[in-house]
Amino acid sequence: GENVEQHPSTLSVQEGDSAVIKCTYSDSASNYFPWYKQELGKGPQLIIDIRSNVGEKKDQRIAVTLNKTAKHFSLHITETQPEDSAVYFCAATDSWGKLQFGAGTQVVVTP
Amino acid sequence: EPEVTQTPSHQVTQMGQEVILRCVPISNHLYFYWYRQILGQKVEFLVSFYNNEISEKSEIFDDQFSVERPDGSNFTLKIRSTKLEDSAMYFCASRTGGARAGELFFGEGSRLTVL
């Protein structure tokens, strides 16, 4: 089955700097890679996703890159703000939508 | 904006008791899921449900667990005889139809504490 590894487990950045979180996956059949943000006491919320036929996708301050050959994908947050502080999870899935999540990255943005 | 709703938000139960967690998925969604998250750990897949039957389940989802969609709107997770290690946050999720994977919408979760 799919195995998703995520690094780092914690990330502390100064407000305004960039944050990068990296994930690898094992199943070459995976073709959908969402990123979720989880705030304390809440459920995961999708922030951006990418499909395997695309190498990069951007939405304002958030971007995701996918290297299908190397089986890794990354989340980039630019100009970080205090409200970006949360746990971020990468995930991978095949066509049937069963997500396998990474272990999560606790991002702390300090003013 | 449509959302997945879950009840209760928090349940405390004694070991060995039965627990039912309830979810109302988004109304036009066809695929339903339960995930769980033990405190401080990753979100883990439990079970997926489509066309009134389980389509896939993980090794966590043993005989103590069952799911049901009793009335076309609710989607329930039952734990027959709870164990201490069942203490976790349980998330329901749903998505639209079509075999191609798409956004999973998660509920706010039900926190289960087994004493």
Image (cartoon, grey):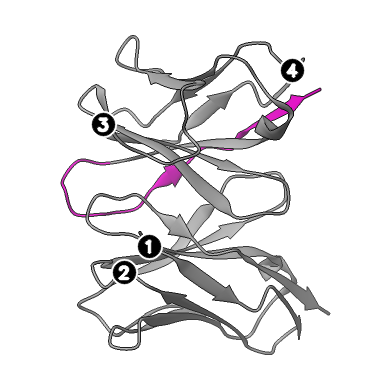
User: Does dot 2 land on a helix, a strand or a loop?
Assistant: loop
Residue B28: give its label.
3
Chain of the residue displaying label 3: B
Residue position for label 1: A2
User: Does label 3 lie on the same chain as label 2?
Assistant: no
Mark 4: give few (<14), some (14-19) or many (20+) Cα within 10 Å. Answer: some
Look at the image and say whether residue A26 sits in the magenta stretch: no
In this image, B111 relative to A20: left or right? right
Inspect the image, locate mark 3, and give the three-letter code of the amino acid beneath it.
Answer: Asn
Indicate which disc, 2 or 1, sits on the residue closer to the N terminus. Answer: 1
Which residue: 37% across, 72% down?
A26
Q: Which residues are magenta?
A: B96-115
Q: Position of residue A68 (x, y in %)?
A: 29, 83
Q: Quadrant of the N terminus of chain B?
A: top left
Question: Quadrant location of residue A25?
Answer: bottom left
Residue B15: give its label.
4
User: Does dot 1 land on a helix, a strand or a loop?
Assistant: loop
**Cα distance between the residues tagged 2 and 3:** 30 Å
Q: Position of residue A2 (x, y in %)?
A: 37, 62
Residue position for label 2: A27
- In this rendering, is residue B17 above or below A47? above
In-front residue for pair A21/A26: A26
**Cα distance between the residues tagged 1 and 3:** 28 Å
Mark 1: give few (<14), some (14-19) or many (20+) Cα within 10 Å. Answer: some
